[in-house]
Amino acid sequence: MMIICVLEIVTHSGRNHSGPEAKRNGAHMAEVHLKSTAGDAMEVETSSAGENAAGVAGLLRGFLAVQQRRAVAYSNLGRGFSEYMATGGEIAYQQLCGNVTAEFNDCSTEIIEMVSLLSKPHLCRGDLANLLKDVQAHERDKLQLTARIQVLKKAGRPSERLVNHDHCRSSSMAQHVCANLKEITEASGTEDAEADAEYDAALKEAIQGIQEAVTSINEHMEEVRYEIDALEAEAVGSSLNEVEEAFPDTVSIK
């Protein structure tokens, strides 16, 4: 029996509570960083430019942490699939697929929350929100293609698939009438070659699609890292300016 692992990415805005609470520190910690500690937690509109910069940097660092969790999940999935192909451990692989799906869903939900925060008026970073949306789209493609590759590899190339004798007629081993036997002709050989070619093309297309998605994701993550550096520099500069304004007579060493 062939087990098909169904992997999904959440596309709604609700939070998935299936994962451990300790893992939900990406968007949550960044959101807390944005809140005022002196009064109502929602009064972020009154924060300084430096605080906003630090808050956005915190969100982006949360995004990088979520992407690291996704990388670990893919590693676990790849290792589990290899073990399944070698041993046929269906129950263990089904459980792994469930755990990985829950992790991907949780990661996606956290990034959706980050997109929402970046789009709020007090931050007004629609550019970064769109960047994270692009990553979500590429991650969705990557996951769908990963599942596609696993389905293809489970099935195997048509010419190399094991013969199933469930539909054969036999009253004993000596009188076995195999339904899989067919006359080997030029036409049948052509059909087998065409089936193999279609399989190879589908596998190649999926692999190339994953490579393209990974390249785009890595480029976006590099943009995020550059943005974090700029935001943290802005936050530090703003803090120094506030100190100088509060103590104008203080001699600063630059």
Image (cartoon, rainbow, N blue to C red):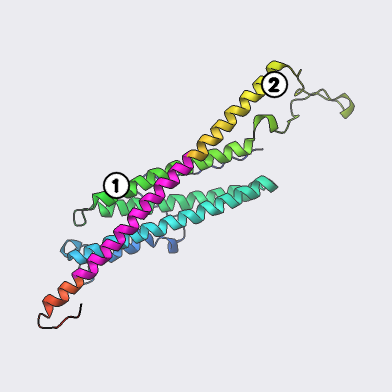
Given this view, does label 1 or label 2 mark the residue nearer the observer? 2
Dot 2 amino acid type: Gly
Mark 1 surroundings within 10 Å by alpha-carbon count, few (fewer than 14), some (14 through 19), many (20 or more): some
Q: Are marks 1 and 2 in contact (CB under 8 Å)?
A: no
- Point 42% across, 55% down: residue: 67
Element marked by disc 2: helix
Provide the residue designation for mark 2.
Answer: 189
In the rendered structure, which disc, 1 or 2, sits on the residue that comes first in sequence? 1
Task: State left or right for residue 105 relative to residue 164.
Answer: left
Residue 24 in percent (x, y) is at 40, 60
Task: State left or right for residue 182 relative to residue 98.
Answer: right
Residue 48 in percent (x, y) is at 17, 66
Mark 2 surroundings within 10 Å by alpha-carbon count, few (fewer than 14), some (14 through 19), many (20 or more): few
Element marked by disc 1: helix
Is there any visible trace of residue 114 in the rendered image? yes
Q: In the picture, which quadrant includes the C terminus?
A: bottom left
Residue 3 in percent (x, y) is at 61, 40
Residue 93 painted magenta: no
Provide the residue designation for mark 1.
Answer: 130
- Point 62% across, 39% down: residue: 154
Task: State left or right for residue 14 relative to residue 183.
Answer: left
Q: Measure the C-alpha gap from mark 1 to mark 2.
A: 51 Å
Q: In the picture, which quadrant includes the N terminus?
A: top right
Please name whichever residue, 31 or 194, is drawn nearer the observer in this view of the structure: 194
Is there any visible trace of residue 31 in the rendered image? no
Task: Please give the range of residues in magenta.
Answer: 209-238
Task: Establish if 238 lies above or below 17.
Answer: below
Residue 118 in percent (x, y) is at 26, 54
